[in-house]
Amino acid sequence: MGHRWFCRTDEDFETFATEGEAIACADRALAAMREVACLDGWLEETSKICWGEIRAVATECDVEETCREQGCDSSNCGKMHFPQFDHTCDYQLMAPDAGE
Ligand SMILES: [Zn+2]
């Protein structure tokens, strides 16, 4: 992820590096709806079309390696023990450019 601008159409959510691309995406979606409207009237989904700036994204953080040592007694290695994961982590809402 990392893209700051988004466009939501009737069926899709896309992100873009620039405001201009997000606006163009919304314009295209609206133009497509307008074509449909000439035949069947405006679809209710038309009002879902929007574009904007993403302020925060759920972003992986606090990545910690887990212990993969066979037979570790886990008392003093200082790591988490989840045999099914090679690491643990959390997610926090962060500005979209924070990780780049
Ligand atoms: Zn261990």
Image: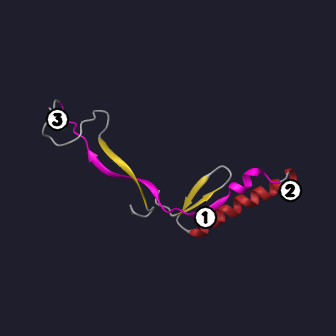
Q: Is residue 79 left or right of residue 27?
A: left
Ligand 1 under 8 Å from disc 3 Cβ: yes
Ligand 1 under 8 Å from disc 1 Cβ: no
Q: Position of residue 23 (x, y in %)?
A: 64, 66
From this view, report whether residue 60 is shown above or below residue 87: below
Query: In the rendering, which numbered label is found on residue 22?
Result: 1
- Kind of residue indicated by mark 2: Cys
Q: Which residue is mark 2?
A: 38
Q: Earlier in the sequence, mark 2 or mark 1?
A: 1
Of the pair 82 and 39, the residue shown nearer to us: 82
Q: Is 59 in the magenta? A: yes
Q: Is 53 in the magenta? A: yes
- Kind of residue indicated by mark 1: Ala
User: Residue at the location (73% across, 60% down)?
Assistant: 30
What are the residue bounds of the magenta stretch?
42-70
Q: Earlier in the sequence, mark 1 or mark 3?
A: 1
Q: Is residue 10 left or right of residue 52?
A: right
Q: Position of residue 74 (x, y in %)?
A: 16, 35
User: Residue at the location (51% across, 64% down)?
Assistant: 4
Mark 2–mark 3 distance (CA, rounded to whole Å): 68 Å
Contact (Cβ within 8 Å) of mark 2 with mark 3: no
